[in-house]
Image (cartoon, grey):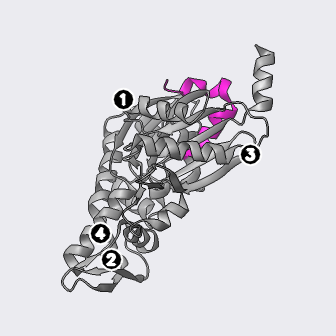
Amino acid sequence: MRWNSFLYKMFSSDLAMDLGTANTLVHARGRGIILNEPSVVSISKETGQLLAVGATAKAMYGKTPDRINVIRPMKDGVIADFDSTRLMIEYFIRTSQIKRISLKPKIVIGVPSGITQVEKRAVIDAALGAGVREVNLVEEPMAAAVGTGMPVGESCGNLIVDIGGGTTEVAIISMYATAYVESIRVAGDEMDEAIVRYMRQKHNLDIGIFEGERVKMNIGSAYPLEGRIKMKVFGRDIVSGIPGSVVFNDEEAREAMEEPVNAIFAAVRKAIENTTPEFAMDISSRGIVLAGGGSLIKGLGKALTRDLQIPVYRSKDPLTSVARGAGVVLENWDTYKRVAIN
């Protein structure tokens, strides 16, 4: 058995993956994060052939002829299009392999804590169909907590808020387990969509979802900024039907994103209200840690601190927290295998 294990380590490139709604990240054993690409694929409608993946496919979004389909195969953190997801995973795995002689890899994949059994099966089947030999799933808030260096093995309350593209995961973690966890399907995508709706309603400008994302990333905020910032937003004028643009500022962006941001704050508040007094005391003294790309919204920590009167910290490099944590689980399997959910 030990000899077999040695051979696998020698001739396989085991991977950890954050299979996200917005982006997919891959961690390779011994090499760290080697891939970070948008979760977008371009497929020929005529042949079913995969044409492009990641940033190249994202650049095609809304700009292709009818014979080409550009798809975001993940929705709310889970598989919305099975075949496209399998092709995407297969491409990322193939891209990650560097060994001339390579056995099928083992993979650890971060998934939302609210995932159903059917959705779990879909992720596992997609990965197996892409050519891996063993699939292990770990809940995203646990992976994020491990990735940020929180003491998940200690008997203390660690509150992690992982704001991704499709889901926000709020979890209290202690002794390698989640004492409380809630997954809400409100996150970065809903903020983008809220900005798109706002532009239509207030400025009669129809913008694409990725233009909404650009607005969020550049001037989106959850707390009043010290100075006003603004940007030009491009789209199609709803009245005239011709290309148009408006100058959009941070105050408007904050107003547009208010509903999804408040939903996230409500989920965090609910977690604290539903935990034990002992955990509440730990959280009050240790604070709340934010992870995930959504935590990069300007002033989010300040607004949450104002709302809850609890210190809030953002993890270092929050975009990679889940992938780094899944990588730690992969590379220290004997210690962390207890956090796997299947």
> Which residue occupies 42% across, 65% down?
61
Residue for badge 4: 196
Give residue 230's position: percent from left, percent from top: 40, 83
Tell me the crowding category of disc 2: few under 14, some 14 to 19, or many 20 or more residues within 10 angstroms, Cα based: some
User: As shown in the figure, which amino acid type bears the numbered disc 1?
Assistant: Val
The chief SS type of the magenta part is: helix
Q: Are marks 2 and 4 in contact (CB under 8 Å)?
A: no
Q: Is residue 53 above or below residue 171?
A: below
Q: CA distance from mark 3 to mark 4?
A: 39 Å
Residue 328 lies in the magenta-colored region: yes
Residue for badge 2: 251
340 lies left or right of 15: left
User: As shown in the figure, which amino acid type bears the numbered disc 2?
Assistant: Glu
Q: Is residue 88 visible?
A: yes
Q: CA distance from mark 2 to mark 4?
A: 15 Å
Residue for badge 1: 118
Residue for badge 3: 31
Residue 147 lies in the magenta-colored region: no
Q: Nearer the viewer, residue 24 or 57?
A: 57
- Quadrant hosting residue 257: bottom left
